[in-house]
Image (tube, rainbow, N blue to C red):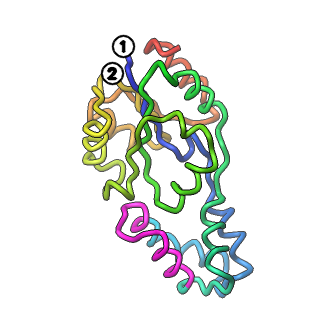
Amino acid sequence: MIDSVIFDIGNVLLRFDFGVAIRRIAPHCTLEPAQIGDALEPMKMDLESGRIGGDAFLNEVSKRIGFRAPVGELRAAWQEIFEPIELTHQLVHRWKGTKGLFLLSNTNDLHAEYFLNKYPVFEAFENAVYSHEAGVMKPDPGIYTHAIDKFGVDPSRTLFIDDLAPNIEAARAAGFQAHQYSEAGHGRLLEQATALGLL
């Protein structure tokens, strides 16, 4: 029997596209769009692992890409890259109050600040582990151990949903029931949820 469900966020609860941010800021940068992405990539890992905070990230990025507009515009562009995946939101609302609901996501303080305020679905979750707060990222085994301890769940009685194969493999190694999610293959999640007695 499954007692709890742990959701990833990106491409599970929310679609995201960093290209949206790059296209939005490109007219204000001295770098070309392709160069902007290359300049951002090395810093994203530092941001999501909590080695730097959001404000420091924005200030450093602004210098690296030659951003010539107010930094608040860079913040908004970095944050406003998400769209809801309504199919999984429906499952969250269905399971609210009947199963423990938790979040385990590689993210950062800028994105968390935005999506927690923007999307009501996050009010359904009891607790969360975010990589920038934990100081470790999926698929490192340490973040799964941290989640088990923080949530107080039995992994063998918990379904973990993520879109990336390495994260699923690590979750299974930690003892979780796990499902690799794709929006196009949403029916496969429903099939597994049904087999596990969740639907």
Q: Secondary structure at mark 1?
A: loop
| The residue stretch that appears in magenta | 45-62
> First in sequence: mark 2 or mark 1?
1
Mark 2 is surrounded, within 10 Å at the Cα level, by few (under 14), some (14 to 19) or many (20 or more) other residues, namely: some
Q: Residue at x 63, y 84 (%)?
A: 67
Looking at the picture, tell me which residue is in the foreground, 38 or 143: 143
Disc 1 packing (10 Å; few <14; some 14–19; many ≥20): few
Q: Identify which residue is drawn at 45% across, 12% down.
A: 197
Secondary structure of residue under mark 2: helix
Q: Is residue 87 above or below residue 109?
A: above
Q: Amino acid at mark 2?
A: Arg
Q: State whether the magenta stretch is mostly helix, strand or loop.
A: helix
Amino acid type at mark 1: Met
- Give above or below for 106 relative to 12: below
Nearest to the observer: residue 133 or residue 173: 133
Q: Residue at x 53, y 25 (%)?
A: 189
Where is residue 110? Give x, y as percent: 52, 62
Relative vertical location of residue 74 with respect to residue 147 in this rendering, above or below = below
Counting from the top left corner in percent of width and height, residue 177 is at 36, 26
Query: Cβ–Cβ below 8 Å for labels 2 and 1?
Result: yes
Q: Is residue 180 left or right of residue 156?
A: right
Dot 2 corresponds to which residue?
Answer: 157
Q: In the picture shown, does residue 24 fall above or below 8?
A: below
Is 61 left or right of 145, judged from the image as shown?
right
Q: Which residue is mark 1?
A: 1
Q: Which mark is residue 141?
A: none
Q: Is residue 59 magenta?
A: yes
Q: Is residue 52 magenta?
A: yes
